[in-house]
Structures are given as structure tokens and as C-alpha cells.
Amino acid sequence: MSYQSKKLINDPNDVVTECIEGMVETYPHLQYLDGFPNIKVVLRADVLGSTYDKVAVISGGGSGHEPACAGYVGEGMLTAAVCGDVFTSPNVDSILAAIRAVTGPNGCLLIVTNYTGDRLNFGLAAEEAKSEGYNVEMVIVGDDCALPPPRGVAGRRGLAGTILVHKIAGAAAAAGLSLADVAAEAKHASEIVGTMGVAFSVCTLPGHVTSDRLGPGLMELGLGIHGEPGAAVADLQPADIVVSHMLKQILSTETKYVPITRGNRVVLMINGLGATPVMELMIAAGKAVPQLQLEHGLAVDRVYTGSFMTSLDMAGFSISIMRADRVILQRLDAPTKAPFWPVSVEGDRPPAKIPIPIRPSRMETNEELFAKPQELSEQGCILEAAIRAAANEIINLREKLNEWDSKVGDGDCGSTMFRGATAILEDMEKCYPLNDAAQTVKEIGTSIRRVMGGTSGILYEILCKAAYASLKVCPVITSKEWANALEAAIAAVIKYGGAVSGYRTMLDALIPASSILKERLEAGVDPESAFVISAEAAWHGAESTKNMQAQAGRSSYVSAEMLALVPDPGAMAVATWYKAAAFAVKDVAIKHLKDEPS
């Protein structure tokens, strides 16, 4: 039975910003950039990017994993942390703001957990920062040992071992090493650490009901930290048996995920997932150390026990094991003022927030540059009708998309798409130049970038930017130019997202739609009919994802049995707005025919 969870919050939409406000009030050496709610960046109060003489170390990701990552901002660890919404990757603008705020002449290192949205957003931000003259390197951490290789394009998930990488990189930067050397130490650390988790309850997102997926007397092995299902469900076992299974999985000689063999020295981290009592974590630590020594022949040099990277209110824990050597131990033992390593709090309290050091963006001056035309052309009327119909259908589908996504992902697909559709409708009335199709497509991407986080947000922005690039060079935009733009947009998503047809993604709706649209237009079918026929192809493609094994995104960690219950939410979202747009275009065309004098 599902029930409303009890949370000490105000508005569920404000939990991240209010958490940040509380953190900087608690720890006087932290500040945040004054960009709420879109820019959520915590940074060291003693660092000014233009004069900072060491390598800046920046990390981040979706919120809900506190104290990660903002709790590790401090001298000797992270220079800044970029916070997304709960379980949602931070957007490109936030990451760029962090880079600009703390990066000096020695450059910055981005440490990124291996999730598609984080890779895409941090990757695009890194490229934009490089184009502005910043020296940027990126290290991706994927320390998950729960699932057997291969994992398609998604790869191994980034888990609590990332915190050890933060500490090592931060200490190397504090010691004055170059960007290349700091990045090399972080990359090396990421390659010698492995993690596995187990959950005794699922987490509950703020404002959502508590799921009953994991019943009494059961535990979930190899879970993700976003509430997605684990590798297997089993009967609850005593602590020493659970710990033994996890250690064997991490140190497996079959998967060879971590290069640790008998006789090595190691570091152990026991990490609580949010609702596990310290007593139980200490029990796990007490069982893990002798098992590592006696059963696996390893010398345990350091043990860290606490809640380092959580999953909201999830009951459970993870174990991370890192191979140790003199340099690793030196970095881990180096002093830090990061509050949750933990360290003492010292120093005078500076202002809690400072302005974002960025140039005015198109997004900020959008209304001055563009406005909705007072009189729409025929093509402008068609475009407006298509956009309005598509957005409204997505708004109506919000709960269904969330329901599907709760079974195969983190349950927020509908909410994310709803934010995008609502922003598009609002911005269309204010600033879309609807008589200019190419520019309107670009502005749709701007709306999406402002409000949609995670993988879907950046993929839709890439889709819009690529379509705009294709359309802007056309003196006259006909149906064939639209078909070419769709094809170019799909190619861009494949290039940057890594997925292809059959991976159980939005592409499984887009690719058949594009193929049929082009085929019917070349056969001489009128554009409106070709659009409608291609919409049916999109719908069939989305429905067919029930029979596909996911190879990208969080669904790639879910069992085939669970995937077969529902279609891919992202593909269904595409099929829905595409079909709504197609029928809207057809309706406008019919109306124009009726209005023409006989």
C-alpha cells in the first residue's frame, strides 16, 4: 500500500534551495551563488576565480544525496559543488557559473558521476568553458560493482566511492599540483575503487507517496541511488552474511572491476544511504574489517563509517573498497575544511551569497530580443497551433509518464516534461518569433534549458539546436526542410547521447517518425498527411520499447521483466507531442481550405 510520506519541508519545489541556505548558515566558510532557483552552486568563500592560484576541483549532480556533494566543499577537497534538483542533473548554466566563479589560471577539474545526464551536462559545460578560454579537464567515476559487464552505453554507475576521489583530487590540488597531475591522480583513484549497495527500503521523493515496491522481510541488492530497482531482491539476512556477499561481489575475480588482490592494502568506506542508524553502520564496519583481513587477505589501512552519499530517506548502506598506497593515504590524511569529511569549523562568517560572475545571457534578455508577432503569417499560425497542441498533450500526460517512469527509472519523467511544456507555452505568448520558424525552434531550446534538468532536458536542447542549425540556412522552409531538420536533430542526439535505435530511448519514436516522414514526402504524399502517418510510426515505435532491453539511461539497470511491463516513458512522451503536433497541423490546413473562397 502506498502512502504519503512524512517530511520536514515546506514547498517540495524549494527543498534544494532551502537546504543550501541552511548549509551556508551552518558553515561560515561556504557561500552560494545568487541565482536561485535556476543556479544552485555552493562554493568556498575564500576563493575568487580570477586570482585563485591552485587547480579548482568541482563536482556535483542531482540533490537528495546529501551531504554529497555540497558537504565536501572546503579547503583540501572541493572548490565548488553544483546542485541539481532532486535526482536531476544540474543544468549547463549552473555548471558554467561554478567554473567561472572559482577557476583561475591553473584551470579546473570536473569530477562527474557516471550518469548520462551528468556526463552530458558537465561535458557540454566543459566545452563551452574551454571556448571561453578556461583550462578544463573532466574525470568520470563509475565505481558500481553490482551489475555484470557490459552495461551498454550507460556503463557503471557512480556511487559513494566518488567521495574518496573528491578527497584525493582536492588534496592533490591543495598541494599545488598542476591540472594534468590532479586529473591523473583523480582518474587513477577512480580506477581502483569499487562499490556495492543494499537497501532495506526505497526512498521517497519530496511531495511523492512512498512506494511499496520493497515489501517486509526483503532487501534489494545492487540498487541505484535514485530509487531505481536493484539487481536482485532477496530475503533479509543477518549483517555478517550481507557484508560477506557485498565484499565478494566487489572483489570478484570474474568481473575484475577493481585491481585488488591478496596482499594489497585497502581503504574501506561504510556509507549509510539516509535512514540507516549509526549503530547498524558500525555493525557492518565491524564485520567487514575482519572479513577483508581473514577471508580476502587484505590489510585495511583506513576505515570511514558514516553517511557520505545518501539517497534521501532510504534505509540501507553501501561498501566501497579502494586499493591503497603511500600517495593515496597521504591524500586521504591531508587536512581539509570540508564540513562532512568531517572537520571542525573555523573563521569569521563572510556574506552568505555573492553575485554570479557571468555575462548577461540570451536567456536573461530574451524578452528584449524577441516578441510574439502582432500578426501571424500562415506558417506562423500553423507553428503556433502545433506547439500549443504538443505542449498541452504533454501537460495532460504528466501523471502517466511519472507512473511509467517509477517502474523503470526515478519517477520524474512526467514532472520534468511538464516543466518544459509549461515554460514553452508561457514563453510562446511572450517571446517566440513564430513567423521565423528556425528562430522559434531555437527559442524552444532556450525555454527547455531554463527549466528542464537531467538527461531529457539536455537531449531536447540538443535536438532543438541541431534542428535550428539545419533550418536557419534555408531561405524558404518547406516540409522537406522540416524533415531534414528532424533528421539532423536525431543525428545530434545519437552523437552526443550515445544511444541508437533499439536502446529503449526517445530515439525509438523519433527514428521511425523521421524515416516515414521523409519516405512519404519523397513519394509525393501531401505534407499534412505525411506528418500524420509519421506520427503513427512514432507511436508504434514507442509502444515497441516494451520488447526492448534498455542499453542507455537508468532503465539499463532494470530487469527485463520489469521493463516489459511499461513502454519507455521518454519514447512515449515523444510519440505524444509528435502526434498532437501532426493532427494540429492537419486541422489548421483543413480550416484554411474551408476558409478559402470557392
Image (tube, rainbow, N blue to C red):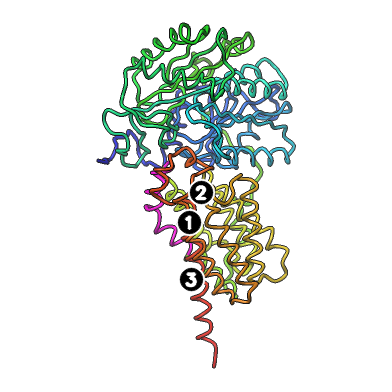
Compared with residue 554, is residue 389 higher up or lower down, i.e. above or below?
A: below
Q: Which residues are magenta?
A: 390-410
Instruction: Determine which residue is flagged by label 2.
Output: 504
The amino acid type, in three-letter code, at marker 2 is: Arg
Please state the horizontal and vertical placement of residue 250, each as a whole percent of the image: 50, 21
For the C terminus, give its image quadrant: bottom right
Which residue is at a point 61% across and 37% down the rendered structure image?
A: 122
Q: Which residue is mark 3?
A: 583
Query: For mark 1, what is the residue?
Result: 542
134 with respect to 376 (left or right): right
Q: Looking at the image, is 196 positioned above or below residue 116? A: above
Taking the view exactly as shown, the residue that stands out farthest to the front is: 254
Report the Cα–Cα distance between label 2 and label 1: 8 Å
Q: Quadrant of residue 5?
A: top left
Nearest the viewer among 595 and 576 is 576
Which residue is depicted at the point 60% across and 63% down? Answer: 515
**Mark 2 Cα within 10 Å, few/some/many (few <14, many 20+)?**
many
Q: Could you tell me which quadrant the N terminus lies in?
A: top left
Residue 150 in the image: state x and y as whole percent: 56, 34
SS class, disc 2: loop
Q: Does 596 sit above or below residue 448?
A: below
* Residue at the bottom extreme of this rendering: 598
Q: Report the amino acid beneath label 1.
A: Ala
Mark positioned earlier in the residue sequence (3 or 1): 1
Badge 3 crowding class, 10 Å Cα cut-off, few under 14, some 14 to 19, many 20 or more, is many
